[in-house]
């Protein structure tokens, strides 16, 4: 019979137990946050198609999405990898060898290995969902984090990568030559 993990037991017991299990003896897996904007679908697709199905890591994909439109990103990406790909649900525990995709219209953060969603609301102006998620990764109590910036314009992700690195995490940026849009990876590399 397979041995259940503390997080499996906590999920079966209910939400209040999840928090206590996460704070005690939960097995911590590395979390890989991957951010992209323009050109992100192609970059995500290439990355996932070339990753082995069993890495022992959990992958969280953050893309700039129109808050008013439904996203099919999880469905599209599930066609290129044998890992389970799903849209994030608030309170979800990150499991190894799974891919989690940000839904539209929300801000995503990580707290003690748990994904948290908050409504973005009607806020206009600059929204930096990659920096917000990366910052929360850097602050996460369990600390095993990797930040990756892929194709996109602007600089979203750069500050977050700096915070991940300062917290002892690992950071990567796509080679701008291979990116559909070079702004985000180039800015990250220069920083």
Image (cartoon, rainbow, N blue to C red):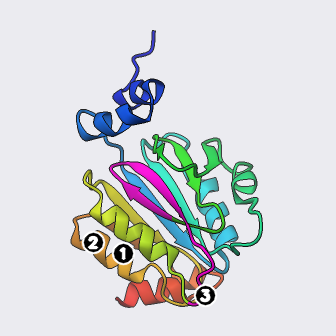
Quarter of the view holding residue 67: bottom right
Q: Which residue is mark 3?
A: 124
Q: Which residue is mark 2?
A: 165
Rendered position, 165 above or below 145 = below
Q: Is residue 14 magenta?
A: no
Task: Return the x and y of residue 81 as percentages of the image width and height.
Answer: 65, 47
Q: CA distance from mark 3 to mark 2?
A: 30 Å
Q: Give the mark nearest the N terminus, 3 or 1.
A: 3
Identify which residue, 138 or 81, lies in the foreground.
138
Stretch of the chain drawn in magenta: 108-125
Number of dots carrying numbers: 3
Q: Is residue 116 magenta?
A: yes
Left or right: 84 as drawn, with respect to 158: right
Q: SS for tag 3?
A: loop
Quarter of the view holding residue 43: bottom right
Of marks 3 and 1, the one in the foreground: 3
Judge the density around disc 3: few (<14), some (14-19), many (≥20) Cα neighbours within 10 Å: few
Q: Which residue is mark 1?
A: 161
Residue 151 appears in view: yes
Callouts 2 and 1 close, C-beta under 8 Å: yes
């Amino acid at each position: 019979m397979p041995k259940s993990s503390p997080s499996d037991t906590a999920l079966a017991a209910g939400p209040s137990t999840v928090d206590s299990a996460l704070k005690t003896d939960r097995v911590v897996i590395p979390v890989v946050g991957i951010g992209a904007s323009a050109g992100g679908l192609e970059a995500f697709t290439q990355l996932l198609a070339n990753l082995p199905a069993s890495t022992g890591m959990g992958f969280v994909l953050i893309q700039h999405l129109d808050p008013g439109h439904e996203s099919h990103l999880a469905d599209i990406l599930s066609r290129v990898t044998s890992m389970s790909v799903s849209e994030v649900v608030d309170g979800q525990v990150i499991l190894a060898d799974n891919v989690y995709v940000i839904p539209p219209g929300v801000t995503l953060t990580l707290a003690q290995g748990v994904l948290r969603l908050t409504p973005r609301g009607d806020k206009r102006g600059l929204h930096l969902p990659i920096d917000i998620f990366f910052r929360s990764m850097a602050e996460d109590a369990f600390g095993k984090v990797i930040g990756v910036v892929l194709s996109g314009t602007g600089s979203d992700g750069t500050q977050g990568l700096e915070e991940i690195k300062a917290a002892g995490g690992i950071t990567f940026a796509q080679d701008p030559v291979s990116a559909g849009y070079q702004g985000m990876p180039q800015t990250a590399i220069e920083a």
